[in-house]
Image (cartoon, helix red, strand yellow):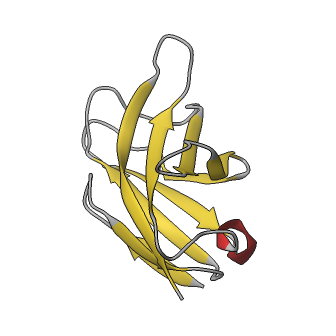
């Protein structure tokens, strides 16, 4: 299993058809802890907007560290090899990580992801 992490807003390069864990860190702040947040990580086609795959808490997104005013929050996204099988190596897909709770919906991070192999 590969492990990737990136500063906010950076583009990603992943091997197509490989299990991996992607780490996202949210800086400490008064809006934390993220203990009961509903979260969604998605990768979508750059033209059609259709989802290549989507992950949610309990189904691929793990709140590794909930965070606080003095500790960063850390989230782990588990991507299975089969999630990326249909990805084309000629495209840069869009990825987004967002909070989806009613009244607190906000994009946390995102960018482009390109698949190799």
Q: Position of residue 47 (x, y in %)?
A: 49, 47
Q: Position of residue 56 (x, y in %)?
A: 65, 44
The quadrant the C terminus occupies is bottom right
How many discs mark residues in the rendered view? 0
Residue at 44% over, 64% down: 23
Taking depth in this image into account, of 38 and 97 the one nearest to the observer is: 97
Residue at 31% over, 63% down: 11
Residue 100: image quadrant is top right
Whether residue 92 sits left or right of residue 48 in the image: it is left
Above or below, 31 against 74 in this view is: above
Above or below, 23 against 27 in this view is: below
Residue 68: image quadrant is top left
Taking depth in this image into account, of 52 and 90 the one nearest to the observer is: 90
Residue 19: image quadrant is bottom right
Above or below, 2 against 52 in this view is: below
Whether residue 79 sits left or right of residue 105 in the image: it is right
């Amino acid at each position: 299993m590969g492990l990737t992490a990136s500063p906010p807003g950076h583009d990603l390069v992943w091997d197509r058809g490989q299990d991996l864990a992607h780490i996202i860190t949210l800086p400490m702040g008064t809006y934390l802890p993220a203990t009961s947040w509903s979260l969604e990580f998605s990768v979508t086609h750059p033209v059609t907007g259709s989802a290549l795959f989507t992950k949610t808490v309990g189904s691929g997104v793990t709140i590794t560290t909930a965070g606080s005013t003095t500790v960063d929050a850390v989230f782990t996204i588990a991507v299975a090899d089969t999630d990326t099988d249909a990805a084309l190596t000629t495209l840069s897909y869009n990825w987004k990580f967002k909070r989806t709770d009613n009244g607190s919906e906000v994009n946390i991070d995102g960018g482009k992801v390109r698949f190799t192999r």
